[in-house]
Image (cartoon, rainbow, N blue to C red):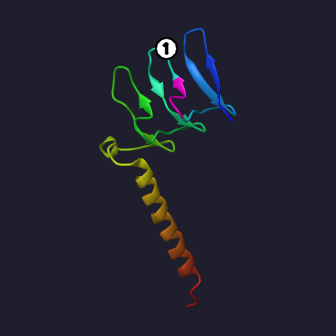
Amino acid sequence: MKPEKNINDDGVVRYILDGKFHRKDGPAMIDARNNKYWFLHGKRHREDGPAFERCDGPNEWCLNDKFVNPTLKNFSFEVLLNKITQIKNKKDIFYKTISSIDL
């Protein structure tokens, strides 16, 4: 399903899906000053650049609504997310193993 594009009288462009900002192929909102905001399912998220591009200030990098250190911007966000998932899965396996041991 594609998000619905809305443009208000001030020229603010919004892409809305199920009541949330959402767009896969570009910013989900562009405000009247040309600041650009990337969202997926209502969460600030962009893997190939900053999730918030300011027209006159520092950009903000976010993945899954969490801020990311901009020094990591040259890394593949997909690889970073995969590493985080692997660590979480290993932690879950460890806790399941420990909890199954009878002492």
Residue denoted by label 1:
32
Q: Which residue is at a point 56% across and 19% down the rendered structure image?
A: 13
* SS for callout 1: loop
Magenta residues, start to end = 25-29
Indicate the position of residue 23 as horizontal and vertical percent values: 57, 33
Amino acid type, label 1: Ala
Residue that lies at the very extreme toward the left in this rendered image: 71
Up-down: is 6 above or below 65? above
Is 26 covered by the magenta stretch?
A: yes
Q: Quadrant of residue 96?
A: bottom right
On screen, residue 54 versus residue 103, left or right, reads: left
Up-down: is 67 above or below 5? below
Indicate the position of residue 61 as horizontal and vertical percent values: 40, 38
Q: In the picture, which quadrant includes the C terminus? A: bottom right
Indicate the position of residue 30 as horizontal and vertical percent values: 50, 21
Q: Which residue is at a point 29% across and 44% down the rendered structure image?
A: 71
Up-down: is 102 above or below 74? below
On screen, residue 63 versus residue 43, left or right, reads: left
| Crowd around label 1: few <14 · some 14–19 · many ≥20 (10 Å) | few
39 and 23: which is toward the camera: 23
Dominant secondary structure of the magenta stretch?
A: loop
Indicate the position of residue 56 as horizontal and vertical percent values: 34, 20
